[in-house]
Amino acid sequence: MALSVLPHKDELGIKDGQSFVDGEWVEGTSGESWTHVHPATNEECGQFGVASAADVDRAVTAARRAFDEGDWPRWKAKDRIKLLRRVSELLADHADELSRTQTFDNGLPISFGSIYQVSADFAADAFDHHAGWVDKIAGETLPTYTGSDFQILTLKEPVGVVAAVIPWNAPVMLFAQKVAPALAAGCTVVLKPSEYATFSVIRMAQILEEAGVPKGVFNLVLGPGSTTGEALITHPGVDKITFTGSRLVGKRIMEAAADRIARVSLELGGKSPNIIFEDVDVASAAATAMGMVSFGLSGQGCVCHTRALVQESIYDDLVNGAVAMAAATTFGDPFDPAVTSGPLINQRQLDKVVGYIEKGSAEGGRLVCGGDRPGGDLAAGNFVNPTLFADVDNSMTIAQEEIFGPVLAAIPFRDEEDAVRLANQTNYGLGASVHTNDIRRAIRVAKAVRAGSFGVNGYTVMPNAPFGGFKESGLGREGGRQSIEGFLETKTVTIALTDSPI
Ligand code: NAD
């Protein structure tokens, strides 16, 4: 029987999507609707009304009103903590349903939906973590240079109305990474999810409503980037834009923000290196290296380590191990727990990845496995077999550009110095890893590689740990104290202590 995800639409109770503006669920007034096409089957399986510029204006106006005139920024810490913890509890209660809805959105195999970093459990913990900051937002008291004529102190205040724009690959986790710290700081939010992953985000918005987030404090606008997204990022009522997505759109966000000096934080793409030294268990390192791009969303993760830098002495063994790992890939119905790997999100991404594979061969990479697409029932979906290029030079296109697909480039290195040089030879700087049993070397390499997060013999992301990029991988950090700081302004207050201050 041909693959179909449609039965899950009823099981999950998915209805046509609506925007959430000023406490009400509304149809977009653009007169246009967006059809959700499932990437594993290319079936049309849902739709939503596109929010027009007028809808976005209503959402920003509601958020503006809730911030400027409403109680939200002035709520008692105790009440805000309670509300954010309630959101956290509801997310945890609905974790399974949210994970299935995410699979309905983007085809992430359900076997990976429970992996902590992309799960509703992560989202629940992010709300819980940020609830914990609410009563710890604190300024400083400072001495003066001129004696005891003044007392100086700083206040931390919410930045205002936040426009949050997120991609399709981890909607549940990324919703929480943005909305939890923004609300904890006392900001109000208008969020635009990706047009390719809306239903799990709608479900999360319903959970915020159920938890009792006041009218206008959280708003959701649905639609593509070119219309709904542009209306949001260029709206003069927005004080800060927090964006996760591609480098190209990140640059456009900065441009739009520059016009009115809006605050910006950006979580962009990567070309993360995985440095593998000869003193490790090669089979295990090879499985990790290939698993990063072949399992889960088939390499469609910002921090997938798509460059394997491998010491020359173990290079051939590592390549053979990676091929064996690629053979363990199972495609199929993403709701089947035995399936390990998902499809590419849409036809455009499929064409892009196929184009990169052709370019890899044309520029002299040695195609060791993959490069093709599975047939039979799977031909209807956007699947690509895990692909390994060996003997890649770090200057080749496939070693420099983010492919966002199941393509691993294996690049040999001589020694530690060579490995660090190659790792840093990129415009990106999101993640990196080293595999070695020499702890001193691990620390030297961790310090030398320019990336926002670094794994030693393993890599992870947590709600309380800052995550973000060096170089063109972004600006700012999500997770932990730095995350909430990104939604605060600092105000310096000077208090005269004498009758005749200067
Ligand atoms: P994308 O940049 O195409 O889209 C991201 C979001 O921006 C979507 O909601 C889209 O509708 C919106 N958008 C597009 N054009 C816009 C515009 N002109 N104005 C306003 N909004 C606009 O990215 P994508 O394909 O959804 O996601 C993949 C990218 O996201 C990859 O580059 C990946 O590395 C990156 N990513 C980064 C992180 C991170 O934390 N650093 C996490 C996940 C994904």
Image (tube, rainbow, N blue to C red):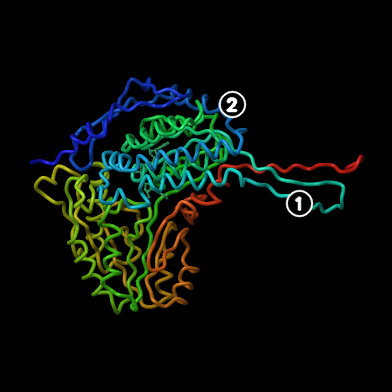
Quadrant in the picture for the N terminus: top left
- Give the residue at mark 2: 70
Name the front one of labels 1 and 2: 2
Where is residue 387 shown, x and y percent of the image? Answer: 22, 59
Where is residue 276 shown, x and y percent of the image? Answer: 35, 71
Look at 51% across and 30% down and name the residue there.
217
- Amino acid under label 1? Leu
- Give the residue at mark 1: 142
Among the 4 quarters of the image, the one containing residue 237: top right
When the figure is inspected, residue 302 is found, relative to residue 327, above or below; the finding is: above
- 107 or 56, which is in the foreground? 107
When the figure is inspected, residue 448 is found, relative to residue 12, above or below; the finding is: below
Where is residue 7 shown, x and y percent of the image? Answer: 18, 35
Quadrant in the picture for the C terminus: top right
Among the 4 quarters of the image, the one containing residue 458: bottom left
- Amino acid under label 2? Gly
